[in-house]
Image (spheres, grey):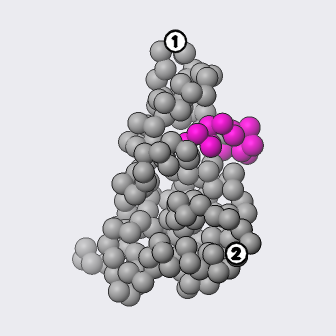
Amino acid sequence: MSENKVQFAPFHAVNQFMLPEYRQQVIQKVLSSLDQLSPERRGHINSMINRYVKIPGFRNSAQAPLALKLRNSINVFESHADFTAEILAGWSDLQPELRKQVYEVLKSRGWELLPEDTDRTKLPGFLVRWLKSETYEEIDATYQLQNPDIGFNSDDVRLMAVWLGGRLPYDMVEVEKDEE
């Protein structure tokens, strides 16, 4: 019976695949650009900051200076799946061109994806199965081939692939089984 069950890793499991410096860059990008996000996304993030991030001297942590929010948000990103999902969604929303490009790369490689604009924060987490043939290096190479005039950050392309694909490379498989 367990063979037919879909397995998910919580969103904060992505931390096992992120370097600390890069994690900080992602969180900082979102927190410093909250005003560029939709009111709904901004509201969700601020609400979670107020709920989870405790900053001495602030009743509402969302009102704290960026440096304090950033420093105190890193542990929350590492331990609260819902906060991680909102930050990743905000990060994705701030980079619509990269999102579109990576989406096209994954589609061209045969990935079955939810529509690009799907709110992935509503999912239970990341699927844990990943095709062995879909290495980060192969995804990077396809990205560069399809977007030769665009400089790219490999970490950004890889994180976007994880976010859009809804998968983490835990269980490396030769062929994809039906995960319904």
Q: Main secondary structure of the magenta part?
A: helix
Q: Nearer the viewer, mark 2 or mark 1?
A: 2
Q: Quadrant of the N terminus?
A: bottom left
| Residue segment shown in magenta | 27-41
Residue 81, image x and y in percent? Answer: 43, 47
**Amino acid type, label 2:** Asn
Give the numbered dot on residue 147. 2
- On whether residue 29 falls in the magenta region, the answer is yes
Residue 129 at least partly seen: yes
**Mark 1: secondary structure:** loop
Please identify the residue farthest to the bottom as the structure is shown: 175
**Amino acid type, label 1:** Gly
- Residue at left offset 59%, top offset 61%: 153
**Mark 2: secondary structure:** loop
Seen from the viewer's position, the closer of residues 132 and 119 is 132
Q: Is residue 97 above or below residue 139?
A: above
Which of the marked residues, 2 or 1, is nearer the chain's N terminus? 1
Q: 162 left or right of 42?
A: left
Q: Which residue bears the numbered disc 1?
A: 57
- Residue at left offset 55%, top offset 73%: 140
Q: Measure the C-alpha gap from mark 2 to mark 1.
A: 47 Å
Residue 156, image x and y in percent? Answer: 57, 59
Q: 22 left or right of 151?
A: left
Please identify the residue farthest to the top as the structure is shown: 57
- On whether residue 104 falls in the magenta region, the answer is no
